[in-house]
């Protein structure tokens, strides 16, 4: 079953430490007091041919989650992928997900996150 995880390493996005943010710029997830939390979202579809072949893999995406908890469509960037066929289902699932927004100073903020989606079969099943 595909699994989604956050990567909150300081190098997961631009380094904003020691700089003043322009109004509306996304904040790096490592700098917020409360990171976004996925509340709902579809399970990414496992590509049939890869499932039949028993291919496992990971897709790493970067995206901006806005202050309302939605992923901004133009912000999704593929950082890495074990197989090109995993990319579209991972992107579609991420774009259809809803998050509790990140908070900084008690205020919901746009945040740049890095997410890993693992496509793993167990006993030939999702």
Image (tube, helix red, strand yellow):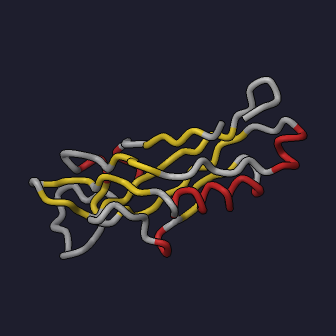
Q: Residue furthest top?
A: 123
- The residue under the point 62% across, 55% down is 90
Residue 2 image offset from top left, x and y in percent: 63, 40
Asked if residue 10 is positioned above or below residue 68 in the image, the reply reads: above
Asked if residue 111 is positioned above or below residue 23 in the image, the reply reads: above
Residue 56 image offset from top left, x and y in percent: 75, 37
Q: How many marks?
A: 0
Residue 93 image offset from top left, x and y in percent: 57, 56
Q: Residue furthest left?
A: 105
Q: Is residue 88 left or right of residue 29?
A: right
Please identify the quadrant where the N terminus is shown: top right
Q: Is residue 64 left or right of residue 16?
A: right
Say which of 18 and 84 sits in front.
84
- The residue under the point 36% across, 54% down is 99
Say which of 95 and 39 sits in front.
39
- The residue under the point 27% across, 65% down is 67
Q: Is residue 104 left or right of residue 48?
A: left
Please identify the quadrant where the C terminus is shown: top right
Q: Is residue 120 left or right of residue 43?
A: right
Residue 119 image offset from top left, x and y in percent: 68, 40
| Quarter occupied by residue 26 | bottom left
- The residue under the point 81% across, 39% down is 55
């Amino acid at each position: 079953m595909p699994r989604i995880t956050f990567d909150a390493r300081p190098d997961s996005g631009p380094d904003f430490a020691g700089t003043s943010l322009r109004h509306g710029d996304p904040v790096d997830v490592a700098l917020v007091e409360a990171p976004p939390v996925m509340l709902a979202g579809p399970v990414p579809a496992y590509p049939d041919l890869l499932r039949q072949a028993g291919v496992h893999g990971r897709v790493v995406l970067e995206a901006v989650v806005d202050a309302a908890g939605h992923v901004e469509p133009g912000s999704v960037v593929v950082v890495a992928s074990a197989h090109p066929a995993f990319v579209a289902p991972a992107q579609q699932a991420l774009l259809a997900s809803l998050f509790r927004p990140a908070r900084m100073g008690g205020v919901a903020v746009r945040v740049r996150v890095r997410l890993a989606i693992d496509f793993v079969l167990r006993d030939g099943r999702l």
